[in-house]
Image (cartoon, helix red, strand yellow):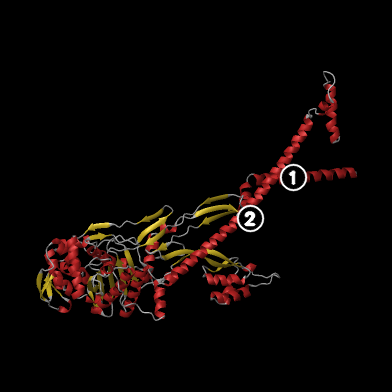
Amino acid sequence: MTVAQAVRAPRARRSHQRPLRGGHRPAASRSRAPASWEVRSFVVASLAIVVAFVLVLLYLAQATAVSAEGYEAQRLAAQRDELRRQNTLLEIESARLEAPARIEADAAKLGLVRAATIYVVTPEAIAARP
Amino acid sequence: MSATVSSARLRMLFALFAVATLILSARLVYWQTFGRGELLGRATDQVRSDLVLTAQRGIIRDRGGAILATTVELRSLYAIPAQMTDREKNDLRGSVATAIAPILGEKAEVLRAAFSSGAEWLFVRRRLPEATADRIAALNLPGLGFELEPKRLYPNGAIAAQVMGFVNDDGVGQYGVEGRYDAILRGVDGRLVVEQDPDKRELALGLRTAIAAQNGQDLSLTLDLATQTAAERELAAAVERERATSGSVVVMDPRDGAILALASSPTYDPAHVGSADPEALRDRTIAWTYEPGSTMKPITIAAALDKGVVTPATSYDDVGYATIGGRRLSNALGRAYGPTNVTQILERSANAGAVFVASKLGAHDLFTYLRAFGFGERCGVDLAAETTGSVRPLAEWYPVDLGTIAFGQGLSVTPLQLASAYAAIANGGTLYRPYVVATRRDADGEHRTAPVAVRRVISDATATTLRTMLTATVDEGIANGASLPRYSVAGKTGTAQIPSADGRYVDDAYISSFAGMVPASDPRMVVVVVLERPQSKLLGTIPAMNVFKGIATDALRYARVPPDRP
């Protein structure tokens, strides 16, 4: 049985079971007769399959996108961690360079000597000036 | 006939298949029921990864924010010898060893032997310096890889080594602040369970269970890096020049007990703690005791002044010695000073004078004041391994002990105890608990350590009087070597004999010390310097005073303390 036969055959059977009442009906109204349950089932099943297919496609697309974004997030997190590590290393290097002991040693190499006296000007002394 | 045979064969074949099917079915049932867990475990192990999220150890800074200790992840070099091949599968272990040996400062033969030892995976060198790791990474050699491992770094090298302590290979703090605050600094490790792809990347849609790590708290110390550096520089120079066995320095803010510097010699480099002399690990400012000698005279006189049994003008006739408990206790070099008042006892450091004052005070009151000043018990500083020192119970005192303890023999103290006692004199009579950690910072914010006033020891008037007397000791007396231009200094020298194992004192060896405060008019810091067995012997207080001057000069400049004298 072809699909056309399967669709047509029930209509023929229904015309026998339920004869027309009230005489003549316009042709347009005949052509809009309700579809049989097989047709409706077929359409619903087809739609369900299509919807399911689309949903699966959407899910796969989303899953792929999430996975890709997840990999990207991991790459960025690793990059962030590495930058933080480099930052810590720079902070350590900065602390090393700012260490008073290192500065004193370098100053001594340059032949610098400590100031014998540091003059402190107090606010009172400034205020007392004419 | 042939049909019969064929039928039999078919039956046999059928039976064979039936049996095989039964066996396979039974096997299938087994793996689906009893063996399910094992299979599931194997499958899970291939994708699931259970990782420890290591908590970051807290940073330690000085009072100005300079980093004293921090943790950074450094690259450790590992090798997988089986992967040391080229595209044609030629063995490259020898050439890899030859390539990295000069960078690591290692012999190529040693590395080649390690690669050929049969190990599937091995560390070549752990926690490499960045430059070294970069050079090896640039070679892009097969079979080598890097793994990050945390390492505790101390950017100032050996500065404040004993105060800081160190962290061992297991990540546990030892000694000093690292040991005392280990639980706070260490934090709590987290856990991450994830599913991974074959490249060990986390699957975004897979299982993910995470317990975040709680990083350790950051600590800010009361230490001042500049003052600490000055203290260590001056102490190291004096110890070397005097060939002293050891030395220690305490610098304390008398206003609240905050420790500005603790220096101890011998010392060590935390980067090479494995090769350090065990004695160098000891913080001698808190974990070593000595008989303080004449630096105790101000304590004896403070007690007598506070008790009202003497005044600065009270005098006696100094004949060069005092007799107590049937024993004669002499002045240094047996000098007789004649009429001497209490201020002059300090200026001349007269032992006989200290005995005179102690006799007026009495053993009970001297003992009471010694304990009130904190001798014979821990200061309670927040550092590991503090010791108590020793003040024998009053019931165990012989009559002569009143005299000897009055000038600092027959009891033992730590340099920190002496500094705390002098700080009480400096701040008007209140004994503060010394402390090193000023603040700790966690997720809730900053928590500041509140200074702890332990007790009032002497009255404000007594403290002021004593500061004046100690200022005279520096300006006109035996401690004149500690005077500073444009700043008033109050202090006292000490030369103490060293007890030997047989209960006597060691011949011709001394512990020289100086304890002082500056500016004397409104003390901002108390400094105690101790040198063990300086080669200057009885003149060892001179290098001790020089150490004081060097430290005080730098510290006053850094602290922007204005001069109090023209």
Q: Amino acid at mark 1?
A: Thr
> Which numbered tag is attached to residue B197?
2
In which quadrant is the C terminus of chain B drawn? bottom left
Judge whether residue B252 can be spotted in this image.
yes
Of the two numbered discs 1 and 2 in the rendering, the one whose residue sits closer to the viewer: 2
Provide residue A119's location: percent of width, then percent of height: 30, 74
Quadrant location of the N terminus of chain B in the rendered image: top right
Taking the view exactly as shown, the residue that stands out farthest to the bottom is A111
Q: Nearer the viewer, residue B278 or B443?
A: B443
Is residue B406 depicted above or below A6 in this figure? below
* Rendered image quadrant of residue A120: bottom left
What amino acid type should be assigned to the residue bearing mark 2? Answer: Asp
How far across and how far down the image is residue B492, in percent? 22, 71
Disc 1 from disc 2: Cα separation: 36 Å
Residue at the outermost right position: B1
Q: Secondary structure at mark 1?
A: helix
Q: Residue A89 vs residue B552: left or right? A: right
On the same chain: label 1 and label 2?
A: yes
Q: Can residue B395 be seen from the camera position used here?
A: no
Q: Look at the numbered disc 2 and give the secondary structure of its residue.
A: loop
Residue A31: x %, y % from top left = 82, 29
Image check: B32 left or right of B317?
Answer: right
N-term-proximal mark, 1 vs 2: 1
Query: What label does residue B38 carry, if any?
Result: none
State whether residue B448 is above or below residue B77.
above
Name the chain letter of the residue that bears numbered label 2: B
Disc 2 crowd, CA 10 A, few/some/many (<14, 14-19, 20+): few
Q: Chain of mark 1?
A: B
Which residue does the numbered mark 1 point to in the structure image?
Answer: B21
Give residue B69's quadrant in the image: bottom left
Q: Residues within 10 Å of mark 1 (few under 14, many from 20)?
A: few
- Residue shown at 56% from the left, 68% from the top: B77
